[in-house]
Amino acid sequence: PGLLLGDVFPDFEAETTNGKIKLHEFLGDSWGILFSHPRDYTPVCTTELGRIARLSSEFSKRNIKIIALSIDSLEDHHGWTKDILAYNCEESACCSLPFSIIADSKRELAVALGMLDPDEKDKDGLPLTARCVFIIGPDKRLKLSLLYPATTGRNFDEILRAVDSLQITARKRVATPADWRPGDCVMVPPNMSEEEAASLFPAGVYTKDLPSGKKYLRYTPQE
Amino acid sequence: PGLLLGDVFPDFEAETTNGKIKLHEFLGDSWGILFSHPRDYTPVCTTELGRIARLSSEFSKRNIKIIALSIDSLEDHHGWTKDILAYNCEESACCSLPFSIIADSKRELAVALGMLDPDEKDKDGLPLTARCVFIIGPDKRLKLSLLYPATTGRNFDEILRAVDSLQITARKRVATPADWRPGDCVMVPPNMSEEEAASLFPAGVYTKDLPSGKKYLRYTPQE
């Protein structure tokens, strides 16, 4: 069974490349993103974890803790890490990966969190993890999730865009329209009165006229 | 319980703005995308369904059938459609929406498909549907899914990009790296031998040297 929006993200203990963690303790009061990937030493996964490493300052700026997961062993994670760092930069021998990778070699978390991709199997015929993204709020609840198959690498610009929307809309009573980018106008929630909107959004509210005559299509500058 | 990658997408009968449909019959041999939205006559949903309507030729070019869903009545869907068309174009009075909207007013599909967003409730305190995207292959199996909350509008460029990757990787034994765009190089699967790769990809295969000495980071031009 997959996780639904609003579910408390299961707490768990796991072995990682930086020691044992308890997820909720690891997250603390931060936002969190759990990324799963199918297999160490494979091409798309290397490009993905390489990009996550390069985005590390973007994630920490947003107070997000990152953790990766696959069903490989700690030994493979450590060996493969050198490849990821070399993919990012030829002179990276001195660097380390700015996040930990969980070794879910018994597939316990993969099954519990609904992350397996039945189309991708290892040489023993066991399914690998899909490319899952679980964005977890400071309240430990699931805020957004993506499930991509092994053959389709994720879009990390979209993940940052979605996080920016989640964080702005958690702070303020606004929503972000289709294809919104940080800096674009945001939308006023439909259940907010005109008076309240006027006082909450001193920069002004633009209301689009619609055939229904209803006044719900309201924009305000992002502040 | 949410749907997992590889699950056969449940067949169902539903009332839509263009009559009753059975999902599998409606999809036929095409790809399909089911989009859910929280509520008719609300701001973000209007921008989203407006964008889906404008992308209609992009979807049909890719042999994808689109269907939308919310828990509102057919009457609301029909009334709201006029607002969506006016949002897209002031002179759209003559147009009609190029896809149907399911009226799941009893929330049966919303519950069965794990689409509810517990943070968003109607005036009776019942949860609304989240912004779900289910991409269904011609084999009726779930290929990719997104769950976004009501306050975060989706990114339709990313949905098209993901579809392009799903379709290319269904046709050919390739995978697409992180942040891939149509036209970029694709990746050779790790389980393909050097000989087979050379014969399948006459345009050439570039293999990146890595500290592990393993030869898995292989690119080839998208043909």
Image: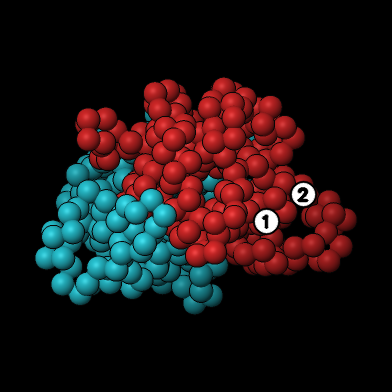
Chain colours: A cyan, B red
Determine if marks 1 and 2 fall on one subunit.
Answer: yes
> Could you say which is closer to the camera, residue B43 or residue A123?
B43
- Does residue A209 appear in this view? yes
Residue at image point 71% right, 39% down? B30
In the picture of the structure, the residue carrying the numbered disc 2 is B172
Q: In what quadrant of the picture does the N terminus of chain B appear? A: top left
Instruction: Characterize the local packing of mark 1: few (<14), some (14-19) or many (20 or more) Cα atoms within 10 angstroms.
Output: few
Task: Give x and y (percent) for residue B194.
Answer: 79, 55
Q: Amino acid at mark 2?
A: Lys
Residue A39 versus residue B33: which sits nearer the camera? B33
Q: Position of residue A209 (x, y in %)?
A: 36, 62
Which mark is first along the chain, 2 or 1?
1
The amino acid on which the numbered mark 1 sits, given as a three-letter code, is: Ser
Check disc 1 and report the residue beneath it.
Answer: B57
For the point 16% across and 65% down, the residue is: A198
Q: Image quarter for residue A121?
A: top right
